[in-house]
Structures are given as C-alpha cells and as structure tokens.
Image (cartoon, rainbow, N blue to C red):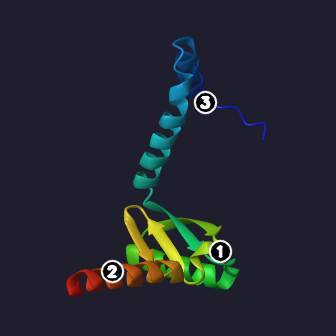
Amino acid sequence: SGESISKPLEQFIDLLLKNKREERLQYIALRFLELYRKKFNILSGTLITATKVDKPTYNRLKSFIESKTGETLELERLTDASILGGFILQIGDNRLDTSVSGQLLRIKSELKEVNRKIV
C-alpha cells in the first residue's frame, strides 16, 4: 500500500540477509504474531464445517466465544465436506469435535472395545 517500514525493522531485515538467515524470517514472523496476540489478548482458531457457515451464525459463535474467554477471536473458516455435518472448532490446544465423521469414529472405537471384551 506504499507504506514504508520502520528504520529498525529495515535494519533487522538487512542483518538477516547479510548473515544469510532469511530462512528464519518465517519463524520470526510467526513468533511476532504469537507475542502480538498474547499482548493484545487475541485468540486464534479454526472453524471447520461441512458447508459454508452464514455470516449471522458465524458472528453469533464468534461473539459467544469472545464473551466466554474475554478475548478477541481471530477465527479462520474452512469447509470440509468429509466431516459430513456438525463442526470442528480448534482454539489453541483445545478442540471441540461435533462433526458427524468424528462421532462415527468414536462409535467405531467404542464398538471395537466392546468386541474386545466379548472375545
């Protein structure tokens, strides 16, 4: 957008290039995002649904999570028809899987366990 970067940032990037460490830039950027989100109380998550979620539903879910956590939520939306229905919500290390495919896997696992006990 035509905006220039700050002089210290420019010097830092020049230093990385000079020392042939440009491959580290990706990790530096990821760490910066992590620290930024922590400082400003921003959670990062992913919502996976079988079909596209409409805007009002997305906004209600996002607002609900923000009200429960007291933090701002950056929520990436993905669609994956293989989950068949329901949703998978991943925020940090927490995962809520209400997908039909997830439920079927749990039922399959339980049936295998029951079968082991019978045999």
Residue sticking out furthest to the front: 119
Q: Is 47 placed above or below 44 here?
A: below
Going from N to C along the chain, the mark reached first, 2 or 3, is 3
Q: In the image shown, does 119 or 97 lie closer to the viewer?
A: 119
Residue 33 point in image, percent of width and height: 49, 47
Question: What is the quadrant of the C terminus in the image?
Answer: bottom left
Q: How many marks?
A: 3
Q: Residues within 10 Å of mark 1 (few under 14, many from 20)?
A: few
Tell me, yes or no, whether the two marked residues, 2 and 3, touch with CB atoms within 8 Å. Answer: no
Task: Identify the disc placed on residue 37.
Answer: none
Q: Is 30 placed above or below 61 here?
A: above
Task: Identify the disc placed on residue 81.
Answer: 1
Going from N to C along the chain, the mark reached first, 3 or 1, is 3
Circle 2 residue: 112
Q: Secondary structure at mark 1?
A: helix
Residue 38 point in image, percent of width and height: 40, 54
Left or right: 31 in relation to 74: left
Residue found 54% across the figure and 26% down from its top? 23
Hey, what amino acid is under mark 2? Lys
| Mark 1 to mark 2 CA distance (whole Å) | 26 Å
Residue sticking out furthest to the top: 18
